[in-house]
Image (cartoon, rainbow, N blue to C red):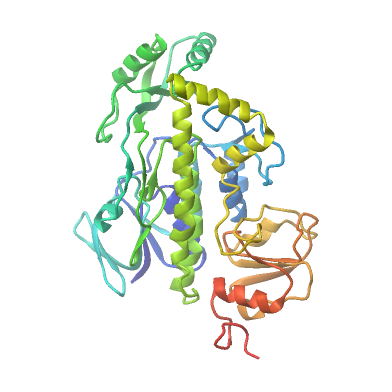
């Protein structure tokens, strides 16, 4: 029996499979497409996702193939300078096409031993107390202990589970593609700049090697959104919106997206979970979609692996939905707000001018940006300490950097006192005695996803939290702590 079947080989599925395999879990990814998609829906990764790549030792590869840009203009396209005092060592957006991100994550997954089966569509499944039997389009079946739906907004897994997906249907579509154009670049740039004064959903951006990324509002809403638009569709909309078709020709691919906004009622039914776009869809304003899915996977991976290896404390798997669904709800709200602020209606434009003035206050600018780049996410772990539930940014230690210590995906006790112990959990938690001028707490216990589970200097309290997040200690008594 396989441990986990992941349905969907996008960034979310690849990250989740890698997190599982990192901890010895046997995982198979199935995907209906025979080849990776050439469609570039996402163009960058934000600070929290950059941190995740850093925590797993992947960041150098991403930096080599991407380009750093300052953080500004992400909230509703309102141009403001990057705010001060961002709580991250990676205060930038990394411009990198989704196709490249998927390639790098595929290489990472394969190197860890993840099995990827392309052209292998999941069509249904049944589950029982022991596992899940997945049905494939070719008539074969796969048996696993868990199934994770990372299969996008039209998720087969979610539909088969019968999970509600309430929200708003799309009211406006946008055409998207990569193509060549014949218009003089200077004249094109001037025309694009003029149109974008009123049409914030419009843009033409050089993509390298004579290719341009074209984004233009569609004339009508497509119900299924399964058939891509034609080049003539794009030309007609460019003329309608910008008064010129810019000489577009030779498209590499064409697609469309809508502004539908939906959130799954549940993230889990029995042995089946939803992750990424299968659990939430929203407009692409702020560039949050890919990032949100990868962060979902980063949260679920270590918890599911702990369950499969018999080390999960009671109710650990329940914390996935409890932590990630509120984050998705917040993202849906901020994309709703941004979409309203990008409307051409007079009331929306008045609100946009007001928000723009408020963003001149650095704290407002920082707060709105912090939501989009996800560095302000704090899980409610039932503790008033403001550090508890937040991820810890990378910081210098006397011996290296904090994120260097998180490469293996284990928990971490960073102990500045030298008086604590995690001996009963040494198979799951690294104990590092080191200091940092940037850390105010005497010691912190970090979960494998880098979020703070405990701070302090009391061994008994530490034992309680070690057991809460990492299960019983080796040789423990009934309380979960080390036996006397």
Question: Compared to 182, does 457 lie above or below?
Answer: below
The answer to whether residue 53 shows anywhere in this view is: yes
| Nearest to the observer: residue 24 or residue 256 | 256
Which residue is at 35% across, 33% downward?
258
Q: Residue at x 66, y 79 (%)?
A: 423
- Residue at 37%, 52% in the rendered image: 150
Q: In which quarter of the image is residue 234?
A: top left
Q: Residue at the spot x=68%, y=46% of the render? A: 87
Q: Is residue 340 left or right of residue 50?
A: left
Q: Which quadrant of the figure contains the C terminus?
A: bottom right
Residue 442 picture location, percent across and down:
76, 66
Does residue 361 lie above or below 446 as drawn?
Answer: above
Residue 285 left/right relative to 138: right
Q: Does the rendering let one see residue 289?
A: no
Percent x, y of residue 411: 61, 67
| Quarter of the figure with the N terminus | bottom left
Give residue 363's quadrant in the image. Answer: top right
């Amino acid at each position: 029996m396989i441990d986990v079947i992941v349905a969907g080989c996008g960034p979310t599925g690849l990250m989740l499979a890698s997190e599982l395999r990192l901890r010895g879990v046997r995982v198979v990814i199935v995907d209906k497409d025979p080849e990776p998609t050439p469609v570039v829906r996402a163009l960058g990764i934000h600070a929290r996702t950059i941190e995740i790549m850093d925590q797993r030792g992947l960041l150098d590869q991403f930096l080599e193939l991407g380009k750093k840009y300052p953080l500004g203009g992400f909230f509703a396209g309102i141009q403001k300078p990057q705010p001060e005092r961002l709580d991250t060592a990676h205060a930038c957006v990394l411009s990198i096409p989704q196709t490249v991100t998927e390639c790098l994550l595929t290489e990472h997954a394969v190197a860890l031993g993840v099995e990827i089966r392309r052209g292998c569509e999941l069509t249904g499944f049944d589950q029982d107390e022991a596992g899940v039997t997945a049905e494939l389009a070719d008539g074969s079946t796969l048996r696993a202990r868990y199934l994770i739906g990372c299969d996008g907004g039209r998720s087969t897994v979610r539909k088969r589970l019968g999970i509600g997906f309430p929200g708003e249907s799309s009211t406006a579509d946008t055409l998207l593609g990569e193509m060549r154009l014949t218009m003089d670049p200077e004249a094109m740039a001037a025309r694009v700049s003029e149109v974008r004064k009123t049409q914030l959903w419009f843009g033409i951006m050089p993509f390298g090697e004579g290719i341009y990324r074209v984004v233009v509002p569609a004339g009508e809403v497509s119900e299924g959104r399964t058939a891509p638009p034609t080049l003539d569709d794009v030309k007609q909309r460019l003329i309608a919106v910008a008064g010129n078709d810019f000489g577009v020709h030779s498209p590499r691919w064409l697609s469309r997206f809508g502004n539908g906004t939906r959130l799954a009622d549940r993230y889990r039914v029995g042995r089946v979970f939803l992750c990424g776009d299968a659990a939430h869809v929203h407009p692409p304003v702020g560039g949050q979609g890919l990032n949100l899915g990868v962060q979902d996977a980063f949260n679920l991976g270590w918890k599911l692996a702990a369950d499969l290896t018999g080390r999960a404390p009671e109710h650990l798997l329940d914390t996935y939905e409890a932590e990630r669904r509120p984050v998705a709800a917040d993202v849906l709200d901020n994309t709703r707000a941004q979409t309203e602020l990008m409307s051409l209606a007079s009331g929306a434009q008045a609100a946009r001018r007001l928000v723009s003035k408020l963003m001149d206050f650095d704290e407002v600018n920082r707060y709105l940006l912090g939501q989009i780049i996800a560095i302000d996410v704090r899980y409610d772990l039932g503790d008033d300490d403001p550090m508890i539930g937040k991820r810890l940014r990378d910081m210098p230690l006397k011996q290296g950097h904090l994120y260097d210590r998180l490469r293996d995906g284990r928990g971490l006790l960073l102990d500045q006192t030298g008086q604590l112990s995690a001996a009963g959990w040494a198979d799951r938690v690294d104990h590092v005695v080191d200091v940092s001028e940037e850390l105010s707490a005497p010691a912190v216990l970090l979960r494998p996803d880098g979020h703070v589970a405990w701070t302090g200097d009391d061994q008994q309290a530490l034992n309680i939290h070690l057991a809460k997040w990492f299960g019983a200690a080796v040789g423990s008594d009934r309380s979960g702590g080390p036996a006397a």
